[in-house]
């Protein structure tokens, strides 16, 4: 499962479409965690798609990640600022790749 303390245990190494990327990153095999308020561990994401279908405010968008061992696309928290903290995505993710900081 995603480390809920990722922002203390990892370094922000990049920014992607306006959100943080937390390392380590070694593309294409290792992609890190995308987002901060809504954080998706790209190295766990299997592109199940439940979060995209269930999020009531369309926070997630697919991004292509060719060559990643778990899946060739990822659910990117592209619109994390729109999140209303409903926690549906956290509940439906089959691999617990998502952390929402509702604190
Ligand atoms: Fe969307 Fe709810 Fe997840 Fe926020 S907590 S990203 S609103 S499904």
Image (cartoon, rainbow, N blue to C red):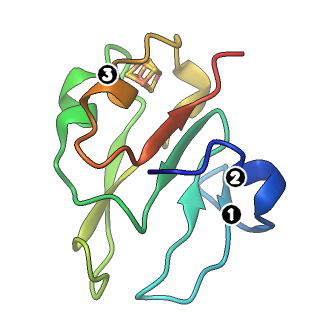
Residue 89 in the image: x percent, y percent? Answer: 34, 28
Mark number displayed over residue 6 = 2
Helix or strand or loop: what does disc 3 sit on?
loop
Quadrant (top left/top right/bottom left/bottom right) for the C terminus: top right
Q: Tags 2 and 1 in contact by the CB under 8 Å rule?
A: yes
**Which label's residue is closer to the chain start, 2 or 1?**
2
Query: In the rendered image, which residue does mark 3 sit on?
Result: 55
Examine the rendered structure and indicate whether residue 24 appears above or below residue 94: below
Which of pointers 3 and 1 indicates the residue nearer the eye?
Answer: 1
Helix or strand or loop: what does disc 2 sit on?
helix
**Residue 96 sits in which quadrant?**
top left
Q: In the shown orientation, is residue 33 left or right of residue 76?
A: right
Mark number displayed over residue 22 = 1
**Alpha carbon distance from label 3 to label 1:** 23 Å
Frontmost residue, 83 versus 46: 46
Identity of the residue drawn at 18% across and 29% down: 53
Identity of the residue drawn at 54% across and 20% down: 82
Q: Mark 3 vs ligand 1: CB under 8 Å?
A: yes
**Alpha carbon distance from label 3 to label 2:** 22 Å
Q: In the shown orientation, is residue 95 left or right of residue 40?
A: left
Q: Residues within 10 Å of mark 1 (few under 14, many from 20)?
A: many
Residue 34 in the image: x percent, y percent? Answer: 56, 55
Residue 65 in the image: x percent, y percent? Answer: 33, 75
**Residue 87 sits in which quadrant?**
top left
Q: Residues within 10 Å of mark 2 (few under 14, many from 20)?
A: some
**Which label's residue is closer to the chain start, 3 or 2?**
2
């Amino acid at each position: 499962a995603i480390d809920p303390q990722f922002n203390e245990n990892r370094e922000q190494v990049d920014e992607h479409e306006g959100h943080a990327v937390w390392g380590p990153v070694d593309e294409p095999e290792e992609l890190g965690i995308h987002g901060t308020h809504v954080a998706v561990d790209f190295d766990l994401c299997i592109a199940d798609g439940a979060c995209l279908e269930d999020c009531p405010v369309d926070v997630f968008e697919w991004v292509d990640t060719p060559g990643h061992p778990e899946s060739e696309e990822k659910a990117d928290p592209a619109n994390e600022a729109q999140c209303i903290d409903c926690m549906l995505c956290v509940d439906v993710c089959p691999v617990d790749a998502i952390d929402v900081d509702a604190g």
